[in-house]
């Protein structure tokens, strides 16, 4: 009877594999890349402990012929968060901390929105599931292109405003993963980067993976960003060293297939137990749940729950658990999707800020589970091209400009030092008769100012930035027209300059 059952299972397995045409998937990926106008990408697929596909598509940089391959490096950005969570899980297994330990046991300076009671209550577990009460992406302006240390960033985060009550909602927080990285440093006595390399990357054979732009090799993709009026352009690599625990890992499809196979095998790979199965189950248990909207039910039929575990997004899909995460870096998007019940894992790495990775991953998932066999890429591309919220936001501001106005404040009255407790000092100076703005610890955010209307000035950045371009700053005055502070308006979906309200201090 057992032999018969085994034979039936083998026949079922072979039948299922025969239905998946990897060559057709390969062709679909390349066509999607062209349709989305993505210069280059790398895709890896693992199934039942084997690499089914690991391949590069397109070129590393526009205007050049250097092809992407399976070892080409891309920023995986927030897919780094799963590595941080696994490091914490490893330390729990080693008895060096507990999930319920208070963050202040390790980082006494840790503070949330000036509330001493809540700050003392936050646990290690809270850091990794986005439920501490901060808004999504709130405070990212503190670390973006900043030379601040991780500790300095965390201390500044004490001034990020509360968006909802503690453990009463979901707010995606990069700052809390930076905090988790410092917890690892405190416990191990070395940077979290060293711990993840020694305990995961090196033994897994992820030999090309790095955690700093300083360590990039020659086989690396170039970031690209879509512009408002010039199409897709080459962008520069940005340093995320201080914020590496939130998204600093740079890897390849070949290396990421090793990471996925270990995770899909219950933390065990080639005889080595990387993560205790009990700890991995906790990482893949929903800690913060999302409401399933009617719109999401239409776009993702077969989903009955969605939530966030510890470093991983979670949902069910046609009876299968799906463990995933996305990543967004300056000029690069990525996605990892794993279906543990199917022993299936997919990684999509791209060198453009186009939303191709999610529909590609879902297309591949559906090829293997034989459900919802629609053209995911075309469908998502249609949505993406029918709406450009950033362009619309900028256009509204351009239309609202009042022409032929003059400032009410003399230029010399604007010059000086301003301070925001969440960020630090911001300086307005004069150079050859023109105003300039400089941000403390972030020389890459320097810009010149040109009169826009009334007491508002357009910001012309010295460098191109991936997440934002157009922006303005207004000079606020008291009733006697004495300059008191600054107000920013830089439309974008992540780096929230409007959270800064610097006041004049000189």
Image (cartoon, rainbow, N blue to C red):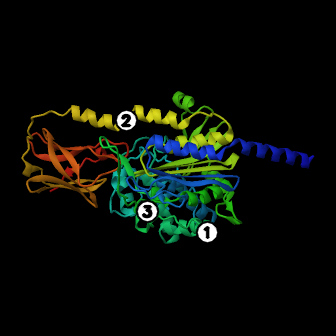
* Residue extending furthest toward the bottom: 189
**Compared with residue 352, is residue 382 higher up or lower down, i.e. above or below?**
above
Image: 434 above or below 106: above
Q: Which of marks 2 and 3 is in front?
A: 2
Q: Which residue is drawn at 56% across and 70% down?
A: 198
The answer to whether residue 287 shows anywhere in this view is no
168 to the left or right of 341: left
Q: Residue 388 carries which label?
A: 2
- Tell whether 312 sits left or right of 135: right
Where residue 502 sits in the image (x, y, percent)?
Answer: 23, 50
Q: Are marks 2 and 3 in contact (CB under 8 Å)?
A: no
The mark tally for this picture is 3
Q: Is mark 1 on a helix, strand or loop?
A: helix
Residue 67's place in the image compared with 17, above or below, is: below
**C-alpha separation, residue under disc 1 versus residue under disc 3:** 33 Å
Which badge, 1 or 3, is on the more N-terminal residue? 3
- Secondary element type, mark 2: loop
Measuring from the top left, give residue 271's x and y in whole percent.
Answer: 71, 66
**Which quadrant does the C terminus fall into?**
bottom left
Using a 10 Å C-alpha cutoff, classify the residue at mark 3 as few (fewer than 14 neighbours), some (14 to 19) or many (20 or more).
few
Which one is nearer the viewer's eye here, 364 or 320? 364
- Mark linked to residue 27: none
SS for dot 3: loop
Q: Residue at x 34, y 62 (%)?
A: 148
Which comes sooner in the sequence, label 2 or label 1? 1
Q: Nearer the viewer, mark 2 or mark 1?
A: 2
Q: Name the residue under label 1.
A: 203
Q: Where is residue 275 in the image (x, y as percent from the top left)?
A: 64, 60
């Amino acid at each position: 009877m057992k032999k018969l059952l085994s034979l039936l299972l083998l026949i079922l397995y072979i039948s299922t594999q025969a239905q998946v045409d990897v060559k057709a998937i390969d062709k679909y990926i390349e066509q999607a890349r062209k349709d989305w106008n993505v210069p280059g990408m790398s895709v890896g697929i693992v199934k039942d402990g084997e690499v089914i596909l690991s391949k590069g598509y397109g070129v590393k940089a526009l205007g050049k012929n250097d092809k992407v391959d399976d070892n080409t490096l891309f920023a995986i950005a927030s897919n780094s968060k799963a590595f941080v969570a696994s490091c914490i899980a490893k330390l729990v297994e080693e008895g060096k901390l507990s999930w319920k330990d208070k963050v202040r046991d390790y980082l006494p300076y840790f503070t949330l929105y000036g509330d001493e009671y809540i700050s003392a209550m936050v646990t290690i577990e809270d850091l990794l599931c986005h439920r501490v009460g901060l808004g999504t992406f709130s405070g990212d302006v503190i670390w973006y292109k900043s030379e601040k240390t991780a500790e300095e960033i965390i201390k500044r985060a004490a001034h990020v405003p509360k968006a909802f009550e503690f453990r009463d909602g979901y707010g995606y927080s990069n700052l809390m993963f930076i905090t988790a990285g410092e917890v690892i440093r405190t416990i191990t006595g070395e940077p979290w980067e060293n711990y993840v390399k020694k305990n995961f990357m090196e033994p897994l054979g992820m030999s090309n993976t790095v955690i700093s732009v300083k360590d990039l090799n020659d086989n690396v993709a170039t970031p690209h960003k879509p512009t408002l009026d010039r199409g897709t352009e080459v962008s520069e690599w940005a340093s995320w060293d201080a914020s590496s625990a939130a998204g600093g890992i740079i890897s390849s499809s070949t290396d990421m297939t090793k990471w996925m196979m270990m995770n899909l095998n219950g933390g065990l790979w080639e005889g080595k137990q990387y993560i205790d199965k009990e700890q991995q189950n906790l990482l893949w248990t929903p800690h913060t749940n999302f409401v399933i909207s009617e719109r999401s039910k239409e776009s993702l039929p077969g989903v009955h729950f969605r939530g966030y575990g510890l470093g991983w997004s979670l949902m069910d899909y046609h009876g299968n658990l799906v463990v995933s995460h996305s990543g967004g870096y300056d000029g690069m998007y990525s996605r990892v999707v794993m279906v543990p019940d199917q022993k299936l894992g997919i990684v999509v790495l791209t060198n453009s800020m186009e939303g191709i990775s999610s529909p590609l991953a879902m297309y591949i998932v559906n090829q293997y589970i034989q459900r919802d066999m629609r053209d995911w890429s075309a469908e998502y591309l249609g949505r993406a091209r029918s709406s450009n919220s950033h362009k619309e936001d900028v256009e509204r501001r351009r239309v609202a400009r009042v022409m032929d106005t003059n400032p009410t404040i003399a230029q010399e009255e604007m010059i000086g030092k301003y301070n925001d407790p969440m960020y630090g000092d911001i300086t307005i100076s004069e150079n050859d008769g023109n105003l300039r703005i400089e941000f403390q610890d972030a020389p890459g955010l320097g810009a010149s100012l040109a009169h826009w209307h009334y007491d508002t000035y357009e910001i012309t950045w010295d460098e191109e930035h991936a997440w934002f371009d157009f922006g303005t700053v207004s000079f606020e005055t008291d009733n006697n027209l004495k300059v008191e502070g600054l107000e920013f308006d830089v439309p974008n979906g992540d780096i929230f300059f409007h959270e800064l309200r610097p006041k004049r201090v000189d």
